[in-house]
Image (spheres, grey):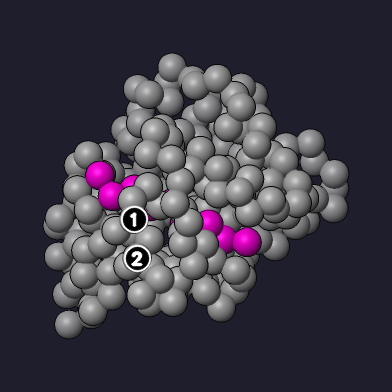
Amino acid sequence: MIIIPARLASTRFPQKVLADIGGLPMVVRTAKAVEHLDRVVVAADDEKIISTCREYGIEAMLTSTTHKSGTDRISECANILDIEDDEIIINIQADEPFIEPEVVEALMKKLQELQTKSEPFIMGSCYNAINAESAEDPNLVKVVLDSDNNAIYFSRSLIPYNRSGRATYFGHIGIYGFSKKSLKEFCSLADAPVEDIEGLEQLRAIHHQKKITMLKVSSTGFGIDTKEDLERAIEIFL
């Protein structure tokens, strides 16, 4: 199942999830990019998003306005829908209209493989290689990995520091996957101090010594974090 958390009152870019991209609201374009893969539900905090999604035939559900993170929002949605604990839930950010379906499908398959190994905590995400110039952008989150391709740390800063001159940079792609059981566990964990410092909710899992399996993919998509990103996206559809 795919759940897309959507918040209307974005601090940096208010109502960006409803911004028009090539004739479709951003959240709708994101949902339509992956609706052929599995059931898609938008978990929103405002009736304006709900009505917009339904206008375009996208299933949407109203959730609390007090959630701190998108992951908390999709957890509420999953509970309302009474999804089974072993169901794989993919969380795609509403500001990822260029997410490639093959990336989502690859993550689904990876998490299903973890289930067959009876892993106690199932959480995964994706990354790709980026150049040094892109790595300087604080809106593009970087990730450092261990030898098993689990995340060691995520940051908006340039990591690793390139003292040797041989650094390779990996950019995090705005997609997460969980089993329903692990999603509930994640949301029950206490917030991590570094989570608030970086503004990155996934650091909560690392702080509590939970594995985040990372899958390397090829992707040219990008999230819409700024008005400049939106202008770039609109130009693509001109």
In front here: 46 or 100? 46
Q: Is residue 192 above or below residue 110?
A: above
Q: Is residue 12 visible?
A: yes
> In the rendering, at what x and y percent does residue 230 appear?
19, 62
> In the rendering, at what x and y percent does residue 232 appear?
18, 66
According to the picture, the residue beneath numbered tag 1 turns out to be: 47
According to the picture, the residue beneath numbered tag 2 turns out to be: 51
Residue kind at label 2, given as amino acid type:
Ser
Residue at 62% over, 61% down: 1
Residue 8 among those drawn in magenta: yes
Whole-number angstrom distance, CA of label 1 to CA of label 2: 6 Å
User: Image quarter for residue 110?
Assistant: bottom right
Q: Mark 1 and 2 residues: CB-CB less than 8 Å, in contact? A: yes
Helix, strand or loop under label 1: helix
> In the rendering, at what x and y percent does residue 198 appear?
35, 28
In the image: residue 93, left or right of residue 125: left
Residue kind at label 1, given as amino acid type:
Glu
In front here: 52 or 33? 52
In the image: residue 234, left or right of residue 128: left
> In the rendering, at what x and y percent does residue 161 appear?
36, 30
Residue at 22% over, 39% down: 11
Q: Is residue 62 above or below residue 37?
A: above
In the rendered image, the residue lying farthest to the top is: 193
In the image, which disc is placed on residue 119?
none
Q: Is residue 167 visible?
A: no
Q: Is residue 88 above or below residue 188?
A: below
Residue at 56% over, 37% down: 151
Helix, strand or loop under label 2: helix
Residue 76 among those drawn in magenta: no
Residue at 55% over, 20% down: 190
- Magenta stretch bounds: 1-9
- Density class for disc 1 (Cα within 10 Å; few <14, some 14-19, many ≥20) is some
